[in-house]
Amino acid sequence: MLGGIWADLADLVLPADCAGCRIRRSGLRHGVCPDCVTALRALRPRAVRPVPAPPGLPPCHALGTYGGPLRETLLAYKEHGRHAVARPLGALLAEVVAAAVGPVRPVLLVPVPDTARAARARYGDHLGRLTRHCARRLRAAGWPVRVYRPLRALPRPDSVTLDSAGRAAVAATAFQVRPGVLAAPPGSSVVLLDDIVTTGSTLAAVSHVLSLRGLSPAVAAVLAATEKRHQR
């Protein structure tokens, strides 16, 4: 563990709803109660892979399964504008990056871009904020880190109701390289960042576009991985 994720978070005096359990409490740390802090701290990054995995999906690590306090905290952040939890979530994402990459080395963090429509719906560039806090935590632990935004997201339909094939079809044409994109510096590990992995189609599509420009991702790091539900 990189350490110190929660130790430097100031308690709030007035009671508020915890982002992780939705219970109204006092003494929240950036919007999260002590019980949910304990639950989030107990999570350990691990390798995950959707089944079936789309072609081109890089090795992927997640902090935990999309459920419990992790799911609720992510929803509070993305859907309800609880920006206070961006700092601890970004620090937790740094834990995933460290576990995915291995020994300390230069890393190039590439967050998956949001469409303009999604950014408006999610109270701004939610992954950009997470990436900044992630990079800050890694640098404090001695990692040489750069944040790179080589892609822009093109308008596309909401993928929530799509199956794996539908998500893959949408993702395949969803991203465009910005002008002047350069290859990764020699010796750097390119790390894709996202908040949740479901089918892996988005990460695979981004990886494909980047690889064509000499930015082939070594790994992908996400906060949560959904579990496939088997029909009875």
Image: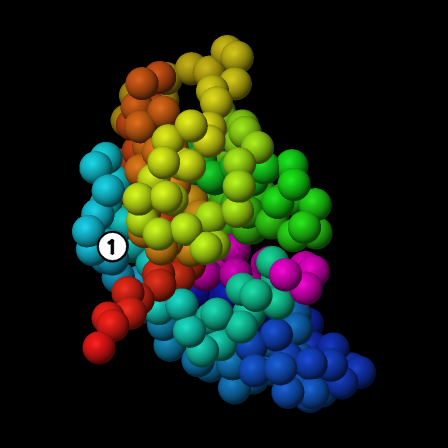
| 146 left or right, relative to 75 | left
Count of numbered marks: 1
* Way the structure is coloured: rainbow
For disc 1, the marked residue is 50
Residue range corresponding to the magenta coloring:
79-96
User: Which quarter of the picture shows residue 193?
Assistant: top left
| 134 left or right, relative to 220 | right
Residue 180: percent from left, percent from top: 50, 11
Q: Is residue 23 above or below residue 180?
A: below
Q: Nearer the viewer, residue 221 or 118?
A: 118
Identify which residue is drawn at 35% across, 17% down.
213
Residue 85 located within the stretch drawn in magenta: yes
- Residue 144 visible, this angle: no
Majority secondary structure of the magenta segment? Answer: helix
Q: Quadrant of the N terminus?
A: bottom left
Residue 195 located within the stretch drawn in magenta: no
Q: Nearer the viewer, residue 143 or 132?
A: 132
Identify which residue is drawn at 31% across, 44% down.
165
Farthest residue to the right: give it.
14
Identify which residue is drawn at 35% across, 61% down.
225
Q: Amino acid at mark 1?
A: Pro
Residue 110: percent from left, percent from top: 44, 35
Q: Nearer the viewer, residue 166 or 49?
A: 166
Q: Is residue 199 above or below residue 176?
A: below
| 105 left or right, relative to 135 | left
- Residue 89 visible, this angle: yes
Identify which residue is drawn at 54% across, 64% down.
74
Residue 101: percent from left, percent from top: 28, 45
Q: Quadrant of the C terminus?
A: bottom left
Farthest residue to the top: give it.
180
Residue 44: percent from left, percent from top: 32, 68
